[in-house]
Every structure is written in structure tokens, then in C-alpha cells.
Amino acid sequence: MERRFGRNDVLLLVILAGLCIGGMVLVHRSMTSGSLVQVMIDGELYGTYDLREEQTISVETDGIILNVIQIRDGQAQMTEADCPDQLCVHHAAIGRSGESIICLPNRVVVTVLGTKESEYDALAR
Ligand SMILES: [Zn+2]
């Protein structure tokens, strides 16, 4: 039976290692859920907001409210918009790093950022 030590054990180790890496990726993914929301109008930074803080953001230019973003339970959602298509309002809430809601007619882009560090990375690029 000692002869059985070999290929099968190596295979088992490979499977275990794979599961281990898979688990680590899952943990990493949950850790990269966004913590900041960045709002851009026409390519210019409008503001950065904390995703862990419940708040309502009115995005306005020249006193006209374009979009209203609501942050709740770690997720951001476009609740109101004066655009004709209303696509952004119907977009699901976002909460993961890299996700975004784009309001094309208003050129408003809401993006979830990861940690502050990754925000600096993005700026450095
Ligand atoms: Zn819109």
C-alpha cells in the first residue's frame, strides 16, 4: 500500500492548494468591496463620498440638480435624475470596487472606489 504514495497524493495536494487559493481569492474579494464613491461630471471630479456613511448627494451644476445619489447600507444608487432616458435611475445599486453608474445625458459618472490607497494609485497613473 505504500506504493500508493505518489501521484494520488500529489493530486490531492494540488486540489487542496487550489481550494486554499480559491478561499483566499474569496476573502480578498470581500475585502475589496468599495469604501468610497467618486462622482464625476464631464470628466471632472465633483466629489468623493464615504460609502459607509448614509447620505444623499445632490449633484448639481449652476444650481440645477442633475442627479441625486443615495448611499445606504454600503451601496450607492441613483434615486433621481433629470435626464430623459432615466437609465441611471433604473441601474442597480453599486457597492463593489470598480462598479459604476453612468448617466450619459448628464455626463455624470458615479464610481465605487476601493480603499484610499487604491484611489491614490488611480491618481498616480
Ligand atoms: Zn441618467
Image (cartoon, rainbow, N blue to C red):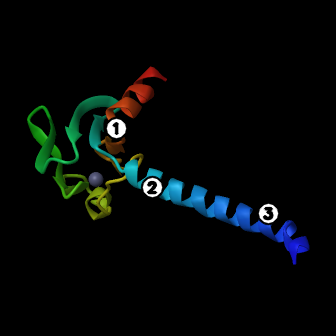
Q: For residue 61, what is the image quadrant?
A: top left
Q: Within 8 Å of ligand 1, the CB of disc 3?
A: no
Closer mark to the observer between disc 2 and disc 3? 3
Residue 104, image x, y percentages: 35, 47
**In the orientation shown, which residue stands out farthest toward the top?**
124
- Count of numbered tags: 3
Which badge, 2 or 3, comes first in the chain's sequence? Answer: 3
SS class of the residue under badge 3? Answer: helix
The dot on residue 10 is 3
- Where's the N terminus, which quadrant? bottom right
Closer mark to the observer between disc 1 and disc 2? 2
Q: Residue at x 28, y 35 (%)?
A: 41
Q: For this rendering, which residue is in front, 48 or 39?
A: 48
* Residue 7 in the image: above or below residue 42: below
Q: Which residue is mark 1?
A: 115
**Residue 27 vs residue 74: left or right?**
right
Q: Which residue is mark 2?
A: 27
Q: CA distance from mark 1 to mark 2?
A: 15 Å
Give the class, few, some or many, for how many residues have Cα within 10 Å of label 2's Cα (few <14, many ≥20).
Answer: few
Closer mark to the observer between disc 1 and disc 3? 3
SS class of the residue under badge 2? Answer: helix
